Image: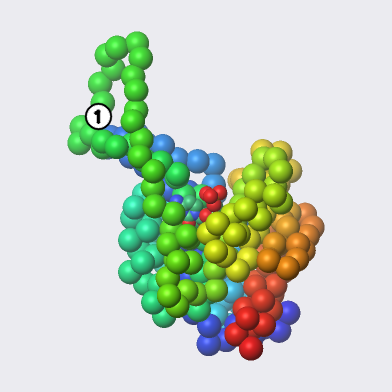
Amino acid sequence: FKTESLSGTQIMITAGPTWEALDPVRGITNHSSGMMGYALAQAAIEAGAQVTLVSGPTALTPPERAKVVNVVSALDMHAAVMQDIQDKHIFIGVAAVADYRPVDQQGQKIKKSQDEMTITMVKNPDILADVAARNPAPFCVGFAAETNDVEAYARGKLERKKLDLIAANHVGGEQTGFGVPDNAITLISAEAATPLPKQNKYALARQLIAEIAKHYQTKNA
Ligand code: C5P
């Protein structure tokens, strides 16, 4: 794709998992490595965009020219996104945000006592849906990681969250998805479903950014 296809465009990307603390040493998280989000940030920069990367805890080195905001929990990520979203043209939610967080966060390490313990959890805000509900809203792209009925669930999310595009990917297999270098997705808009075949996440990210740029320019033409 044209290297300057996104010049002058401000893009915010969320990436990685979130960490929902139970106490100072324990928490609930997931297998997201952050690789796909970081690869998209890199590809967007190469396409000429200015990128803000709001990242949960990962072991990755962010692209040099990205503005990086490091966060831990879903609530932190929500606050960081809302704080900085005003001037963004495109929002890409790649982070695997925890759906729930423990109601209570203990200030001290929880001690072992009874044979069973119950953790009560409360729903986290949906960052992507909140961004898409803004008026005016940036061009919004979501990710849908599913183990089954991938396209149908993804299309449901596109409509429910009022997104412009959603990248649906199959997880739970061993070849693609969380923590592995390759990924395959289907990019879904209101009009079409475009399969992007299995490849290295960096190559896939470049394809995805080219598609996003095309759809964004069509919408704003
Ligand atoms: O509903 P689900 O979690 O499967 O939707 C996934 C999409 O929504 C991803 O783009 C993810 O980054 C975003 N999301 C979010 N905030 C949440 C949950 C999901 O931004 N609390």
Position of residue 104 relative to residue 7, above or below, is above
Residue 58 at x, y percent in the picture = 47, 51
Residue at 20% from the left image edge and 36% from the top image edge: 107
Position of residue 150 relative to residue 189, above or below, is above
Q: Farthest residue to the top: give it.
A: 115
- In the image, the residue with mark 1 has its CB under 8 Å from the nearest atom of ligand 1: no
Residue at 25% from the left image edge and 21% from the top image edge: 111
Residue 187 at x, y percent in the picture = 70, 62
Mark 1: secondary structure: loop
Residue at 55% from the left image edge and 64% from the top image edge: 162
Badge 1: how crowded within 10 Å, few (<14), some, or many (20+)?
few
Q: Quadrant of residue 171?
A: top right
Residue 106 at x, y percent in the picture = 23, 34
Residue labelled with disc 1: 109
Which amino acid type corresponds to the residue marked 1 in the rendered image?
Answer: Lys
Asked whether 52 or 194 is in front, the reply is: 194
Residue at 44% from the left image edge and 54% from the top image edge: 126
Position of residue 98 relative to residue 161, above or below, is above
Asked whether 115 or 147 is in front, the reply is: 147
Is residue 65 visible in the rendered image? The answer is no
